[in-house]
Amino acid sequence: MGNFKYILIILFVGLSFSSKAQQEPMYTQYMNQLLSVNPAYAGAKGVTSATLLAREQWVGITGHPKTQTLFVHSPMNNEMGIGGSILHDVLGEYSPVTMTSVSGDYSYTITYPGERYLALGLKFGFSFYQANLAAIGPTLADPNDPQFLFDVGQPFLPNAGVGLYLSSPDYYLGFSVPKLIANRISEEDVETGTISREQLHAFFMGGYVFDVNRILKFKPYFMVRATPNAPLSIDLTAQVVFIDKLWAGVTYRLGNSFGAMLQVQVNEQLKVGYAYDLTTTALGPQNSGTHEIMLTFDFSFGRGRVRSPRYF
């Protein structure tokens, strides 16, 4: 009970619905989930690709966050790509806090000499939030706590975003703002005078692949998230690729967590990945880590062989 109360307070006061929140999803295997934050990535793999990801954060805390996501994208021709994603986030056990979002993506690509590409992207979608705080307040929190006096629920929050994605066989760089509209999540709280809103997030990302020798490659990545009135969130990751089949890496989120990941290219179409994180914040002793499982499948649809592996 105490752990669940603690995590709810963190969510609504410190993380998710306050004006200083990081509201966009965070992934350890973010290099395989670029479509979630950058619409310009739609179709960048050159084939129809689907990724399913399941993430359980802070395992060991009652009611810890659970996230399931599905991403699908495909090129339409040499210039245009489309994609879409569904995200479902659940926090809590007795009266869960849920967030569901659906989005569509469109990209237009300009080709430059040397197999370099600059893609411009648009994202459109909506989200649904529901938190039955009034029902759980009397049992898990102070019944007079203003944070638990009112439910939070919005059935339809539309949004739109933009992105840029520059790529070549050796590297990629991207910049995006996936949500440009600061939707109101709840009305002004008469006790605290605060209004909960979605916050603007800007993402800057990049990666490079170095050929060490015939069987080994080295791939560093980074992801920076910027939110008004909140510290920068910076992910640094390094992977080594053995004979284009086994991908092993370590990752560090500054001031937040560190972890490791292992990915296997099962065949030309299927890639399987697993990541494990440990928290470095004050919440660390309360949990036993975060687990993330990823499945990616590339469809050929009779167009011949799928080029494998694809590094970005």
Image (tube, helix red, strand yellow):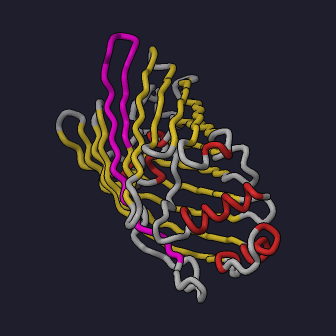
Residue 121 in sight from this viewpoint: no
Q: Residue 199: x and y, percent? A: 45, 69
Residue 293 relative to residue 84: left or right:
right
Please check the rendered image and state whether residue 216 is part of the magenta-colored stretch, yes or no: yes
The image quadrant where one finds the N terminus is bottom right
Question: Can you give x and y, in whole percent of width and height, for residue 114 in the image?
Answer: 19, 33
Quadrant location of the C terminus in the rendered image: top left
Specify whether residue 167 is painted magenta.
no
Question: Residue furthest toward the top?
Answer: 214
Q: Residue 14 sits in which quadrant?
A: bottom right
Residue closer to the observer: 273 or 140: 140
Instruction: Residue 229 in the image: state x and y as whole percent.
Output: 39, 66
- Report the front residue among 68 and 142: 142
Q: Which residue is drawn at 36% across and 31% down?
A: 220
Q: In this view, does 70 lie above or below 264?
A: below
**Quadrant hosting residue 232:** bottom left
For residue 134, above or below residue 15: below
Q: Residue at x 54, y 62 (%)?
A: 15
x, y percentage for residue 116? 23, 39
Residues drawn in magenta: 196-222
